[in-house]
Image: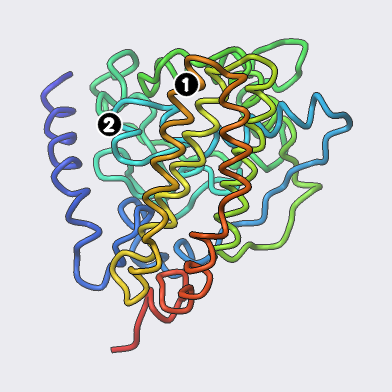
């Protein structure tokens, strides 16, 4: 890593814990890399996903795998995972992110240096050259990578992004195929309405990732299923931080246990995917004991805009 890159990394590493603690900035993960003037929008809403419906069950499962992986920091590994970054951090809901401003990586808001030594030991070029983050849900003609399935260029690009641009661990073939299927299914002709970031939104993400993990594990692919469970655990972390510094904190008493149980499922997936399927079923069937208190306390949590940005 060159000296300028080291300096930028040290600055970034020092700033990340402080950003969330700064006066007036909510202690939420996304606030660490968002423009202060856009925090109200970023922390309370997400752009509507522009996802075309799958034509058949195999395609639907591939898209579901990609959708969960897209939101899993563990996919990228390295410094990105430590910071809590996932693909969705830069491409919110499959779009771009005009509010993205990561210390040491971004120039103007909505940009990132994809050849930075902060994130990559492979592609770091020692030059600070942030580029606009592309909107994956825009017209395909505006994207630099050919998305024709026959060419496999998109799969090759995604593999390089994970393993080279972010120094991530080698992804499974099903993960790469899933991510490519998800990106191909994004289309400006299928955009939904803006989504409110609330407890039900995040719980639905957890359930979707775990149902996908179950299906993948049942096919014998424990490694891909582990990433799906990791995605669910990451979302549980996002839920937890919404309650930690509010009067609703006591409502999270069962959340730690739920996350611990998912960690045990991850370990079991590495050893015996078939046995892990039963554990996932048990987990999904035993959620109301900790979800009920969260729902009851949601108005007092940082899901409430009034609590995120209280009047002074």
On screen, residue 230 above or below 1:
below
Q: In which quarter of the image is residue 219?
A: top right
Q: Rounded to the nearest whole Å, what is the CA distance between mark 1 and mark 2? A: 18 Å
| Rendered location of residue 198, percent (x, y) | 54, 65
| Rendered location of residue 270, percent (x, y) | 48, 17
Question: Mark 1 or mark 2: which comes first in sequence?
Answer: 2
Q: Relative to the observer, which residue lies in front, 268 or 136?
A: 268
Q: In this view, does 222 lie to the left or right of 239?
A: right
| Rendered location of residue 13, percent (x, y) | 18, 40
Q: Is residue 61 left or right of residue 300?
A: right
Is label 2 in a helix, a strand or a loop?
loop
Q: How many marks?
A: 2
Q: In which quarter of the image is the C terminus?
A: bottom left
Which dot, 1 or 2, sits closer to the camera? 1
Please name the residue that numbered disc 1 is placed on. Answer: 161
Q: Relative to the observer, which residue lies in front, 21 or 244?
A: 244
Q: Relative to the observer, which residue lies in front, 98 or 29?
A: 29
Given contact means CB atoms under 8 Å apart, are the residues at marks 1 and 2 in contact?
no
Q: In this view, does 303 lie to the left or right of 274?
A: left
Q: What numbered label is drawn on residue 101? A: none
Q: Is residue 41 left or right of residue 165?
A: right
Q: Relative to the observer, which residue lies in front, 250 or 120?
A: 250
Other-residue count near label 2 (Cα within 10 Å), few / some / many at <14 / 14–19 / ≥20: many
| Rendered location of residue 43, percent (x, y) | 45, 63
Is label 1 in a helix, a strand or a loop?
helix
On screen, residue 265 above or below 224:
below
Residue at point 49% right, 49% down? 97
Please name the residue that numbered disc 2 is placed on. Answer: 128
Residue at point 38% right, 38% down? 112
Residue at point 59% right, 42% down? 135
Other-residue count near label 1 (Cα within 10 Å), few / some / many at <14 / 14–19 / ≥20: some
């Amino acid at each position: 890593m060159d000296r300028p890159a080291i300096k930028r990394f040290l600055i970034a590493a020092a700033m990340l814990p402080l950003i969330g603690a700064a006066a007036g900035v909510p202690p939420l993960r996304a606030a660490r890399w968002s423009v202060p003037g856009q925090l109200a929008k970023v922390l309370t809403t997400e752009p509507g996903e522009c996802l075309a419906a799958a034509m058949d069950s195999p395609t639907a499962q591939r898209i579901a795998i990609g959708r969960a992986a897209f939101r899993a920091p563990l996919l990228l590994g390295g410094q990105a995972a430590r910071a809590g970054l996932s693909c969705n951090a830069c491409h919110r809901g499959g779009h771009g992110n005009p509010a993205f401003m990561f210390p040491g990586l971004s120039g103007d808001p909505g940009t990132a240096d994809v050849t930075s030594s902060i994130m990559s030991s492979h592609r770091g070029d020692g030059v600070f050259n942030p580029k606009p983050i592309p909107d994956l849900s825009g017209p395909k003609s505006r994207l630099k990578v050919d998305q024709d399935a026959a060419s496999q260029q998109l799969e090759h690009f995604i593999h390089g992004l994970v393993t080279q641009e972010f120094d991530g661990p080698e992804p499974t073939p099903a993960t790469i195929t899933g991510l490519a299927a998800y990106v191909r299914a994004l289309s400006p002709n299928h955009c939904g309405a803006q989504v409110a970031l609330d407890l039900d939104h995040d719980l639905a993400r957890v359930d979707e990732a775990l149902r996908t993990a179950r299906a993948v594990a049942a096919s014998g692919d424990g490694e891909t299923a582990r990433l799906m469970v990791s995605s669910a655990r990451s979302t549980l972390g996002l839920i937890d931080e919404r309650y930690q510094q509010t009067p609703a904190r006591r409502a999270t008493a069962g959340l730690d246990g739920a996350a611990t149980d998912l960690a045990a499922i991850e370990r079991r997936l590495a050893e015996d995917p078939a046995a892990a399927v039963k554990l996932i079923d048990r987990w999904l069937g035993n959620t109301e004991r900790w979800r009920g208190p969260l729902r009851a306390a949601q108005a007092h949590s940082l899901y409430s805009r009034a609590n995120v940005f209280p009047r002074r």
